[in-house]
Amino acid sequence: MNKVINHKLSFNELFDEYCNVMQHTMTPHTLRTKQSYYKTHFGHKYGHIIITDFKFKDAQLFANELVNKGLQPKTVKTLLIFLKFFLIYSAHSL
């Protein structure tokens, strides 16, 4: 079976897919936490962006924004780890 690859997925579309696929490998609490991270810190600004258009510079600007908002370094690191795993998932999905 040939899989049709869609390189035009937005972050919102891919995050929905990620949650659906990964929901059985994490606790409900972990899933809700990731959904909250995404909604609160990322989705509202970057959700409409096509995943392949997101560059390293964008990730660094995201990190800078979090620090400038006054978030603690540990919180920023946690959010960047979440973004990293999500981007790894997207790289294997596209």
Image (cartoon, rainbow, N blue to C red):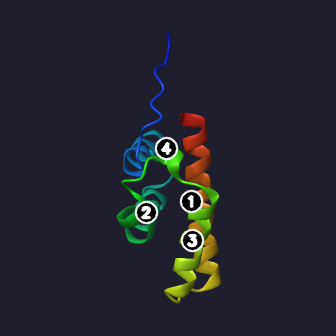
- Percent x, y for residue 80? 60, 66
What residue is shown with label 3? Answer: 61
Q: Nearer the viewer, mark 3 or mark 1?
A: 3
Q: Is disc 3 in contact with disc 1, using a CB cutoff of under 8 Å? A: no
Element under disc 1:
helix
What residue is shown with label 1? Answer: 83
Q: Is disc 3 in contact with disc 2, using a CB cutoff of under 8 Å? A: no
Q: How many residues crowd around disc 2 within 10 Å: few (fewer than 14), some, or many (20 or more)?
A: many
Q: How many residues crowd around disc 4 within 10 Å: few (fewer than 14), some, or many (20 or more)?
A: few
User: What amino acid type is highlighted by mark number 1?
Assistant: Leu
Residue found 59% across the figure and 86% down from its top: 72
State which tag comes first along the sequence, 3 or 2: 2
Q: Is disc 4 in contact with disc 3, using a CB cutoff of under 8 Å? A: no
Q: Nearer the viewer, mark 2 or mark 4?
A: 2
State which tag comes first along the sequence, 4 or 3: 4
- Percent x, y for residue 86? 55, 52
User: What amino acid type is highlighted by mark number 2?
Assistant: Tyr
Using the image, tell me which numbered label, if any, was put on residue 38: 2
- Percent x, y for residue 2? 50, 12
Q: Nearer the viewer, mark 4 or mark 1?
A: 1
User: What amino acid type is highlighted by mark number 4?
Assistant: Met
Label 2 to label 4, Cα distance in Å?
Answer: 15 Å
State which tag comes first along the sequence, 4 or 1: 4
Quadrant placement of the C terminus: top right
Label 4 to label 1, Cα distance in Å?
Answer: 15 Å
Q: Nearer the viewer, mark 3 or mark 2?
A: 3
Q: Nearer the viewer, mark 4 or mark 3?
A: 3
Element under disc 2:
helix
What residue is shown with label 4? Answer: 22
